[in-house]
Amino acid sequence: MNAAHGWTDYHARMSRVIAHVYEHLDQPLDLNHLAEVAHLSPYHWHRVYQALHGETLANTVRRLRLHRASAYLANTALPVTQIASRCGYPNVQSFTRAFRTLYGASPAHYRLHGSHAEFRRGQACISSQYRIEIREVPRVRLAGLAHRGSYIGVGKAFESAYAQLAARQQVGPGARWMAVYLDDPTAVPESQLISHAGLSVRHDCAIEAPLISFEVGGTPCAVLRHTGPYASMRAAYEWLYGFWLVRSGCEAADLPVFEEYLNNPRDTAPADLLTDIFLPLVPVASGGSTSTG
């Protein structure tokens, strides 16, 4: 096995582990079984995982489970006991301890007072934190994967796309992590939602299957800088469409919305995550960049 092939092989093995974790977050995850998924020795595979992903598998599982839990809390009325079970916790007590450690609040307090609640109370319309910037957005080429299902699970596509691009040495310095969302989650069943997640690549970069090439930008956009957990994004969209757009005098273009993730959830607290939401607009005669409340 030459060095290049070995690099590709290890990334592919860890990609299988990530896919398995995403699909079994509600179940106990046995390290020995994951070693079998990776086709590596139980003595060594988790060290390979940490070296390639920058965090231990235990931290990955905890982060993904609580990320899923925060989405349930923000966007559903499921009881906390049921959320704990769906996210792989044996009881509410262990779930509450883990959630409080990462999010700084109990699940019940987060449900009532998280940033998603601020959008729904309408506070965002008067807060400078939620101002909209209208600007021309240059076209960006991305390489990634399609994701089918809940948008909260798009990280699976990101992880797999990154593994494949890194194995081919196609992740350049300053690569941008972006996703485009093709369906309205209020109108399309969750299981049928389609999104594309990927990293920016050069325009002359050759993209090989199963990776796909897609583009975003090349149009004026209303850009909302969102600070906080990804779980509150749905409420931000409700404010963007239901409050800002209908009062702005702007017209949404016949193009899907897309997002850019500006920092890394592996080493960033949920409250400090930064995401730009891009709503493509129909061009108007007078260009330029403006900010609106």
Image (cartoon, rainbow, N blue to C red):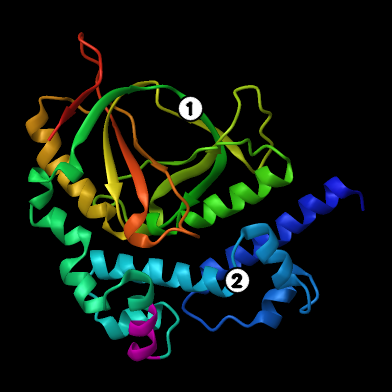
What are the residue bounds of the magenta stretch?
Answer: 91-98
Q: Nearer the viewer, residue 99 or 78?
A: 99
Residue drawn 18% across the image and 25% down it:
251
Residue type of the residue flagged with mark 1: Val
Side (left or right) of 98 relative to 172: left
**What label sits on residue 57 in the rendered view?**
2
Q: Which residue is mark 1?
A: 140
Q: Position of residue 161 (x, y in %)?
A: 60, 47
Q: Position of residue 209 (x, y in %)?
A: 67, 40
Dividing the picture into quadrants, the one containing residue 74 is: bottom left
Tell me which label, 1 or 2, sits earlier in the chain.
2
Q: Position of residue 291 (x, y in %)?
A: 18, 28
Separation (CA) of disc 1 from disc 2: 32 Å
Most prominent secondary structure in the magenta stretch?
Answer: helix
Residue drawn 36% across the image and 61% down it:
270
Q: Nearer the viewer, residue 221 or 194?
A: 221
Height in image: 93 above or below 156? below
